[in-house]
Image: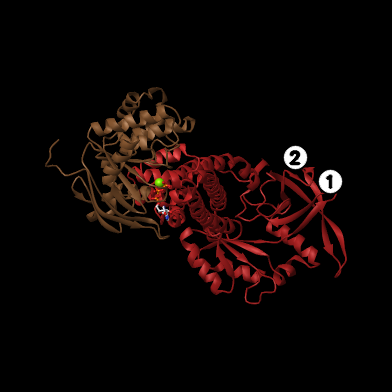
Chain colours: A brown, B red
């Protein structure tokens, strides 16, 4: 890895508040290419909000965000959308797949609406993840776990600079959860920076960096978690 | 238009494709009415103008209308002296009824140069004789075919006082029969020479024919000029002489009653098509966007901006409206062509298939308005929902 290249993500003093009052107070975070990080925190602490900010869906009310050195604050909305499409893969907690597309088409949709052009890449990836037989299924005929794995495949297929996953293992049995984590790990190994929001300390423990979000403030949790795990 | 529209429109039942059936039906209705109206107008125009209508001027007498000159003998003489006028034929209306067999009761009129009877049997002579008559082939249940070529006694009313009258008898030779569906002067009309028609009309008024023609005058008269070019000048002269005169060709071109109404109805139809398309767009786009907010949120995280989401909806609108327009015009034209034969029967006029093709203006309206209207409506209808980022809306819902 070239040490001179800018980090995949560099956020400084990132903040956002919803009209209703909640949101994110302060987040500082740096992820190098190939890093795998976890964000833990109680419900309502702002984890999904942080992800939406890093995913260029929401615009921060304060702070700066650089994606591979590009200052996202200086971009026009259309440029932000384009950067998201090219460089960021997102797996969301409650938003799944497009119901009018088949499984492989959902994966190919990561590249935009010219699905046919990315048919091979999408089907190959599903094959690598052991889901070749699901490729042509209608998404309404898939189980929750299968959908979740396809959503991960969709975020991973373009080998983006950054993968953001909001509780990708919630509601999955340990075996399926493990295969999802392995997929994300292999994305990191191929050079993507991966940020996972989770409530599951096993998942967090499998990551290289751990952050804790509490009442809208993000902090590193290296020592604390290390100590807890030593005690356990 | 976004490429995503192709997928959403084809595969998603909640897309704007739902507007398709309504718009198709409306576009088809508009096309059919345009075709039928065109067919009828063409047929009538060809019929009237083909029978010399281009060189004819119609004179009308309006009873009780002081400013219009009555069509008395001397007035008709004046008309005949107008420059370019070749012939003036006056129409007197009365009645003829069964004297021997049958129970028919026919209206009688002068056979004027404008009457282009579709003769089915016999032959109408160049000038109808005083004791000749042309009848419908069938009227009020009486079949006149067996009487063709024979001289038959007809009854007519002769007034003897203000409210009393007797039946007089006139013998007329039936020289020709015409198709009874041709009803330019109403149903069951017997056509006579000018003198005979005047005789019957005078008898009904209880007057001598010369006196009647001199004092009461004709109902209307057809003025024939030598050349189409003289119509305008002759009309002007006649109008200056106090006649109510109008070229027959004009009367056909802006046929006020039926075709005026059809034209107005079609204009209203165009307006309805446009308004329904817009209204449908507003309602369907708002509903559809709300119902699909989760999908739109996914498209957002996949890199779509709100302008692209709008283009997806616009694409669906253009596809729905475009298909509705094309299918509607095709179906509507087909129906219009299929209606040629029944319409021809109703009007009693031959209509060519090409007559019943809707005009290019109407076709353009039926083709384009569904897409345009739906697109405009979609922009309006989706504005409210797309004002907020679908990502936020979707998360707030879940
Ligand atoms: N769309 C929204 N509009 C208004 N307030 C919101 C919205 N989304 C989240 N919030 C508020 O912002 C705060 C942070 O929400 P967020 O969804 O980021 O929490 P979270 O850490 O992801 O919680 P969870 O673990 O339950 O998913 C909460 O107080 C929440 O009520
Ligand atoms: Mg959350």
Considering the image in quadrants, where does the C terminus of chain A appear? top left
Residue A79 in the image: above or below residue B228: above
Q: Position of residue B348 (x, y in %)?
A: 64, 46
Q: Position of residue A35 (x, y in %)?
A: 24, 38
Q: Is residue A142 left or right of residue B206?
A: left
Front position in the image: B30 or A122: A122
Identify the residue position indicated by label 1 in the image. Answer: B102
Q: Are marks 1 and 2 on the same chain?
A: yes
Front position in the image: A48 or B162: A48
Q: Residues within 10 Å of mark 2 (few under 14, many from 20)?
A: some
Residue B376 in the image: above or below residue B339: below
Answer whether labels 1 and 2 touch (C-beta < 8 Å). Answer: no
Q: Which SS class for mark 2?
A: helix
Q: Give the CA distance from mark 1 to mark 2.
A: 13 Å
Q: Which mark is residue B361?
A: none
Residue B234 in the image: above or below residue B362: below
Identify the residue position indicated by label 2 in the image. Answer: B145
Image mark 2: chain: B
């Amino acid at each position: 890895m070239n040490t001179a290249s800018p980090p995949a993500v560099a956020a400084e003093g990132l903040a956002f508040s919803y009209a209703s009052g909640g949101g994110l107070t302060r987040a500082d975070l740096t992820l190098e290419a190939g890093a795998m990080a976890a964000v833990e925190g109680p419900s309502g602490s702002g984890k999904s909000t942080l992800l939406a900010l890093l995913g260029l869906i929401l615009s921060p009310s304060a702070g700066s965000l650089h994606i591979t050195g590009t200052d996202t604050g200086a971009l026009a909305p259309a440029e932000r959308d384009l950067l998201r499409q090219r460089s960021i893969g997102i797996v969301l907690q409650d938003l799944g797949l497009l119901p009018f597309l088949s499984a492989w088409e959902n994966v190919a949709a990561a590249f935009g609406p010219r699905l046919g052009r990315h048919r091979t890449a999408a089907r190959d990836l599903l094959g690598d993840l052991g889901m070749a037989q699901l490729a042509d299924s209608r998404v309404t005929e898939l189980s929750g776990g299968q959908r979740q794995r396809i959503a991960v495949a969709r975020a991973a297929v373009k080998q983006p600079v950054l993968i953001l996953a909001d509780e990708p293992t919630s509601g999955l049995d340990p075996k399926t959860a493990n295969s999802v984590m392995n997929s994300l790990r292999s994305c990191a190994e191929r050079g993507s920076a991966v940020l996972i929001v989770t409530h599951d300390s096993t998942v967090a423990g499998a990551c290289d960096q751990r952050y804790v979000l509490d009442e809208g403030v993000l902090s590193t949790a290296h020592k604390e978690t290390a100590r807890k795990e030593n005690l356990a | 238009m976004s490429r995503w529209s192709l997928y959403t429109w084809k595969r998603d039942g909640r897309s704007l494709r739902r507007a398709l059936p309504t718009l198709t039906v409306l576009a088809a209705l508009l096309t059919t009415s345009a075709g039928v109206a065109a067919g009828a107008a063409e047929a009538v125009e060809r019929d009237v103008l083909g029978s010399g209508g281009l060189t004819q001027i119609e004179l009308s007498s309006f009873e009780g209308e002081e400013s219009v000159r009555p069509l008395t003998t001397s007035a008709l003489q004046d008309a005949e002296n107008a420059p370019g006028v070749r012939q003036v034929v006056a129409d007197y209306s009365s009645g003829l009824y069964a004297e021997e067999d049958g129970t028919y009761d026919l209206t009688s009129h002068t056979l004027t140069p404008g009457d282009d009877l579709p003769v089915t049997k016999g032959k109408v002579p160049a000038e109808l004789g005083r004791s000749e008559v042309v009848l419908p082939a069938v009227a009020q249940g009486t079949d006149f075919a067996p009487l063709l070529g024979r001289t038959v006694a007809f009854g007519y009313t002769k007034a003897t006082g203000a409210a009393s009258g007797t039946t007089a008898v006139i013998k007329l030779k039936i020289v020709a029969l015409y198709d009874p569906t041709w009803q330019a002067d109403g149903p069951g009309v017997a056509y006579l020479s000018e003198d005979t028609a005047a005789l019957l009309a005078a008898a009904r008024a209880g007057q001598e024919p010369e006196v009647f023609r001199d004092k009461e005058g004709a109902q209307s008269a057809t003025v024939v000029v030598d050349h189409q070019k003289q119509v305008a000048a002759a009309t002007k002269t006649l109008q200056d002489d106090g006649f109510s005169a109008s070229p027959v060709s004009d009367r056909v071109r802006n046929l006020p009653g039926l075709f005026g109404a059809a034209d107005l109805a079609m204009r209203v139809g165009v307006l309805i098509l446009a308004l329904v398309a817009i209204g449908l767009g507003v309602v369907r786009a708002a509903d559809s966007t709300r119902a699909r907010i989760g999908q739109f949120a996914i498209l957002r995280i996949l890199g779509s901006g709100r302008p692209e989401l709008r283009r997806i909806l616009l694409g669906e609108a253009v596809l729905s409206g475009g298909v509705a327009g094309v299918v509607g015009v095709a179906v509507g034209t087909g129906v219009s062509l299929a209606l040629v034969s029944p319409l021809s029967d109703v009007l009693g006029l031959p209509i060519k298939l090409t007559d019943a093709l809707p005009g290019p203006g109407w076709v353009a309206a039926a083709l384009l308005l569904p897409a345009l209207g739906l697109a405009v409506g979609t922009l309006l209808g989706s504005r409210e929902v797309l004002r907020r980022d679908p990502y936020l809306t979707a998360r707030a819902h879940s």
